[in-house]
Image (tube, grey):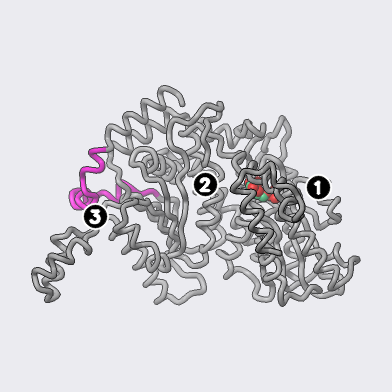
Amino acid sequence: MKQSVSEAFAALRSGRDAALAQPLSAAFDADPQRFANFHATLDDLLYDYSKQRVFADTMTHLLALAAWADVEAKRDAMFAGAVVNPTERRAALHTALRDLDGAPVMVEGRDVAPEIAAERARMLEFAADVREGRIRGALGQPFTDVVNIGIGGSDLGPAMATRALSPFGQPQLRSHFVSNVDGADLYDTLRGLDATRTLFIVSSKTFTTQETMTNARSARAWLAAAVGEAAVGDHFAAVSTNIEKVREFGIDGDAVFGFWDWVGGRYSVWSSIGLPLAIAIGPSHFEDFLRGGHEVDAHFCAAPARQNIPMLMGLLSVWNRNVLGYATQAVIPYDQRLGRFPAYLQQLQMESNGKGVEIDGSAVTEATGPVVWGEPGTNGQHAFFQLLHQGTEIAPVDFLVAARPTNADKAHHELLVANCLAQGEALMRGRTADEAKAMLIAQGVVEAEAARLAPHKRFSGGRPSSTLLYRELTPRMLGRLIALYEHKVFVEAAIWDINPFDQWGVELGKELASRLAPVVSDPAASTEKLDCSTAGLVAEYRKLSA
Ligand code: F6P
């Protein structure tokens, strides 16, 4: 890490004690302008960070940190197609996929914008043809079920978005997502499906991923058993950067869609990997989804840092992680259809920024990505919110909520919003033991009993949260939300000077699984070279599975 950045961190840390000394509720009481000063908007989307433990000087120091870390220059380099992923020698140009104006995108001296537009047009045409029954199964039946087979970025984006945008789907066309190599995933999905009306999409950037290829082979066998080998071609589409491997698998022709190695898996929902989503919501909604992402790109590139939402999100995350020392980050959408959003963000944030070395290979000097977790509210309130309010671990929370429901009851929605706002307020304000005691006495509890219960009913308050409030969860808004978090992750990585676009940490486990697969499947295979724990587990597995 550059000396100047370390110094900026030191300046930031000098404000830590003062930031923690003042109760957050007192900051609100003292400053009626706190909300006005600590929120930013992008027309119908508002980011309120006034309930974070920050003050005017914190923001000054954070913005100085961003300047010293060259966040804006690094951002510009990413958008310009520079090799920002040096360990894989690649650009990261997912932003180009959502620019419907087709502005030139130079990769190794070549404008790839026309290729992007052409592949998108092909993919959207196929999506429309499946959706409207022009492309049919081998026996002439329109498809009623689309099964995406993929994992990680080839699953989470389309699965999350398809669920989030279910009101824009067609009821007669169901979407399914199979990811786990656990055969139960495929079995449970296929049970009850009619093979003559089922379309499979095999989605894999590399087309070598063990889980996906295993599931794809089993799905193909299921289909061939029901409709015959000759029908397979009419029931399989594929999305990959590795067209040769797709052909080897036996999928060919018009139902094969490509993308490029400069699109990271977890950033690929904007590419042909979005095919299941495009089938579900239709081409024009898919384009709105892209537009939403592009609007955030424009905002990220142009808005001054103090009003730049992804910049603020990233800086506040650094403040919480590195200065206040919070190791986790909760994401709580008050939006049932965003049920998979926390899982999607887990890959986006933890695979991107769960790194231990800086870009130059030296060990990081600051803690990097927090553990990201969450579930929709209000359900979470009845599960883990106890810990958020009174536990010894503090987890900053991002709340997400729409002002308008989509195909849902208004009265329900008003309660949902009230709950969301109440949780942020409760985390911020808390309740002193004296207040708790006075409340109990007012309820008729005798003094001694009130004194006994008061410590249990005390809330420390000062627990940080931000709220993203948006008009409605439309395709465009979902595109915005995803892009905001993508760029938030980018800002964090720029400050920590890590590469957010590689994922070497997933390799060792994959290697060892391949080495162990024959040992697990062959009871006679030697376990001599294994450590005694793994060998012991294999021995017991052999006994129990016999
Ligand atoms: O294991 C991690 C990973 O490489 C992710 O980054 C990626 O999204 C996922 O596997 C799936 O990879 P593929 O799309 O190549 O099958």
Q: Mark yes or no: residue 257 visible.
A: yes
Instruction: Name the image quarter holding residue 148.
Output: bottom right
Q: Are marks 2 and 1 in contact (CB under 8 Å)?
A: no
Which amino acid does the dot numbered 2 rest on? Answer: Gln
According to the image, label 1 marks what residue?
Answer: 243
Q: Secondary structure at mark 3?
A: loop
Farthest residue, direction left: 447
Magenta residues, start to end: 17-40
Q: Tell me if residue 536 comes above or below residue 228 in the rendering.
A: above
Relative side of 422 to 521, left or right:
left
Q: Secondary structure at mark 2?
A: helix
Q: Pick the residue in front: 170 or 366.
A: 366
Mark toward the viewer: 3 or 1: 3
Q: Pick the residue in front: 431 or 77.
A: 431
Instruction: Name the image quarter holding residue 400.
Output: bottom left
* Residue 19 in picture, x, y percent from top left: 25, 41
* Residue 241 in picture, x, y percent from top left: 75, 46
Q: Is mark 2 within 8 Å of ligand 1?
A: no
Find the distance from the CA under tag 2 to the CA under tag 1: 29 Å
* Residue 419 in picture, x, y percent from top left: 35, 67
> Residue sitting at 39 percent across and 27 percent down?
6
Give yes or no for residue 20 being in the magenta stretch: yes
According to the image, label 3 marks what residue?
Answer: 460
Q: Are marks 2 and 3 in contact (CB under 8 Å)?
A: no
Which amino acid does the dot numbered 1 rest on? Answer: Ile
Check disc 2: other Cα within 10 Å, few if <14, some if 14-19, many if 20+: many
Count of numbered badges drawn on the protein: 3
> Residue sitting at 68 percent across and 34 percent down?
106
Check disc 1: other Cα within 10 Å, few if <14, some if 14-19, many if 20+: many
Which amino acid does the dot numbered 3 rest on? Answer: Ser
According to the image, label 2 marks what residue?
Answer: 349
